[in-house]
Amino acid sequence: MKKTILLISLLVVGVTSAQSIKVQGFVKDSLGVPLELANVIATVQFSGDIESYAITNFEGRYQLDVPKGESYVLKASFLGYQPQDKTITVPENGEDLTINFVLNPLADQLDGVEIVYEMPVTVKGDTITYNADSFKTGEERKLGDVMKNLPGVEVNDDGEIQVEGKTVSKVMVEGKDFFDGDSKLATKNIPADAVDKVEVLRNYNEVGQLRSVQNNQDNVAINIKLKEGKKNFWFGEVTAGGGLLGDDEAGYLAHPKLFYYSPEYSINLITDFNNIGEVPFTFRDYFNFTGGFRNFNRGGGTNFSIQESDLGFAVAQNNRANEIETKFLAGNFSWAVNKTLDLSGFSILSDNKTNIVTNSIRQYIASGSTEITSSDTDQRNQLGMLKLSGVYKPNSNFQLDYDVLTKVSKQTEDAGRLSQFDEVNNNITEEKENKPFSINQNVNAYYTLNDKNIFAGQVQHLYQEEDPFYNAVLDVLPFAGILPIDENQNRFDINQNKNIETNKIDAKIDYYYVLNNISNLNFTVGTTYSNQKFNSNIFQLLDNGSQVDFNETPPNEGETLPLVNDVRYQFTDAFFGLHYKVKTGQFIFTPGLTLHNYTLKDEQLGSTTSQNDWLLTPDLNIIWNIKKSESLRFNYALSAQYTDVNNYAEAFVFNNYNRLFRGNRNLENALSHTYNLSYFSFNLFNYTNIGGSLNYTRRINGIKGNNQIIAINQTSSVFNIDSNFPDETFSASGRFSKRIKKIEFSGSGSLNLSMSNNIFNNEIRESQSLTQNYRASIRSSFRDWPNFEVGYRYTVNQYDNGGIEQTFFTNRPFANVDIRFLKDFTFDAEWDYYNYTDKNNTIDNTYSFVNANLYYQKGESKWEFQLQASNILNTEFTNNDSFNDQFNTTSQYFVLPRILMFIVRYEL
């Protein structure tokens, strides 16, 4: 496969090179000063079509390719200078040419300047503007298809946009937030034909007052400019289809979308109803979706977060499962009430029904036991989100923001499981339910007193409530000697109620004192306060319908352990920070210190414990701006890790049918030293994108699990491991992409080495894992020829757990093709192949997926007809293996069968 990729690349590049020449030279001003980021465009003299374009580098040098046998007009332009044209003729036997330009400054008054051609790429300050039509091949359907064609822009498998190696934090359309910046919803729903320009906003900061005093190098935003015909008019599309799901089940799809944009307001409506495995919004998306809420005090020296309750809900793999039915409805609006007030908001409703079928073999490392399980799980996720926002900006010196985000969901799961251990069959029925609710409010205020004094304040409040319920009905007595179970029953019906209530307030005030135009001081004072209530109890339902509540474990050598939690837990972090930012030459230094006072208090089991600690956390950020689009950055930070009430509640709680967990009220914080060195370079001159990073983390006094495993049953608790047994993590990553004419070559690689210490059955065991991931691909973007992408993914996972070593290999070649033929037809197909093996040659899992689409759209007709085929090879299941500190698992995971659909799309 690798030889095939190389052969294709050499063939394509060789053919195109033989039919064209290079035109290169310099663009300078009348004083001979090079003009960096000047535009040079080549148009065919007789037709006026754009043939090639270039952007000059820091030397003012440009380079472009033009086919032989034509005459061209070269136009050089730069902001503030008079454009210059030169005409060249390239014969069939022509050779490379050198053409230089000297541009004169524009006069103060011009009678009129006519812009005839629009450059594919223009750069102004930190903004790169791409003319979308210059990069379209005619096969694009969604924004994500357009973004993939832009130099320096990537769209990953999850639909997230990455620019110059950085994940885009905000997506806007006509300057208005699109679902508060969720790039996945944008890339998969905004029609490609509506996109006029894509603006990449580097070093982005929403607050103008803070742009000069904060480091924004990691902040990237995207603004989509619409075509004129899409402004002040409703546009969108309605998609519907039906077909065959497997041999006899009907498949359906309905996907209407509607958009409206004007200077005063915007409205976006997205819906999706289907049972063919297209999941627009997963349960994981729901919990990761912040709705634009900022990460409070990022880099302030404390890691404290509120956990989501984990009942081990099954998760669909790669949006695939045995059955999936989706209902999705989302709306987004923005309204410029007047010049000083903007309102916006969105709502999302989702209802996913999933059936997950798996067969697994699990080998427990500590006990040497083997468990064989098969499960059939029906799951339903009902999710709802509502957010309202307001921005009040009466003048350039003051801004007030308010956001409120409400999230509510109901997740239920019914699972039938057969567990086989030591020739004993254990039929297990599990029921899980969780109905979390949260409301998050945020107020930000920014005030510029004068050129020297800037103030910023933030208050954020979170209220969250969860009530996870767990039920397991088993044939085999669970946790004998720990749970006081009535054994005189046909089956054992064990239940658990939990309730976690959280009130958390974060508040801080930043004061920036500008010393001069190259340095400033930042003083920060703030606090984090969290108050949580945690209640849980375990009980048994008997065959006669009565209920037996469990209060404590049976006596074990004179000791009993609690089974009922009634906990009150408070955490407070009061801090004061000082940072100094200075720019000298190409370097920016930002050292800082933050003083913390931590207070912890918990009430449970009839007593109260408390902790009070002081900690000074340093941090350092160094940026070397080598060139405008090339930088080297270093970060160091010392941070304290604290956990929430889940790890402090000392009574046992169920995690699943064979695992009990209890917290530790004497738990202390861990400390982490984190180092990061990253390099980035994006060269618009030759469209080469290079990035890489090195990371090292050393965690001491780590928070660890003490696991006791008997056969396949496990009890665990948490504790602080001795500082002589630190956890260390090394990671490195790199990426490279280069565009040569219409072909893009890309490659990436990463490795992660993790060394940790854990306790099993009261013995410290060192574990080590090394993960390597590599990816290489070649992708074309021809306008008149078929387009393709071929690539290879290779993964190596090496584990050493207490002397037990295992190594796994995954080989994943893939290929995609897009073909336009007979003028109105388009065909695309994708192939993804998986081969999973291990070093000992005991595993050899192989499977692949093939999907294809055939489209027909007559000219400019609003109607499009599509034949869609998914999982053409009718792959029934996937195989995967996993390995951790406790056990390794080999699983068979069933997926949706072959799907054939006829789909009609109407463009509004």
Image: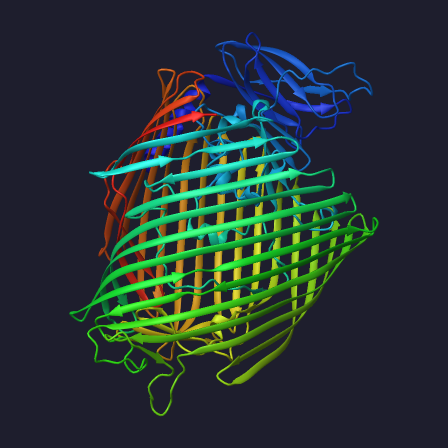
Task: Indicate the quadrant containing the N terminus: top left, top right, bottom left or bottom right.
Answer: top left
Outermost residue, top side: 46
Position of residue 786 measured from the top left corner of the image (x, y, whole percent): 38, 23
Q: Is residue 218 visible?
A: no
Outermost residue, left side: 423
Observer-nearest of 37 and 260: 260
Q: Does residue 579 lie above or below 26 as drawn?
A: below
Outermost residue, bottom side: 558
Location of residue 906 by image quarter: top left
Q: Is residue 86 visible?
A: yes
Q: Is 844 positioned to the left or the right of 228 in the image?
A: left
For the point 44% across and 33% down, the residue is 256
Position of residue 473 measured from the top left corner of the image (x, y, whole percent): 26, 69
Position of residue 474 measured from the top left corner of the image (x, y, whole percent): 24, 70
Location of residue 249 by image quarter: top left
Location of residue 72 by image quarter: top right
Observer-nearest of 478 and 871: 478
Q: Is 662 positioned to the left or the right of 805 in the image?
A: right
- Tally the numbered discs: 0
Q: Is 148 positioned to the left or the right of 298 in the image?
A: left
Outermost residue, front side: 545
Observer-nearest of 879 and 546: 546
> Which scheme is used to colour this image of the protein?
rainbow
Q: Does residue 83 lie above or below 788 as drawn?
A: above
Q: Does residue 336 lie above or below 355 as drawn?
A: above
Observer-nearest of 18 and 177: 177
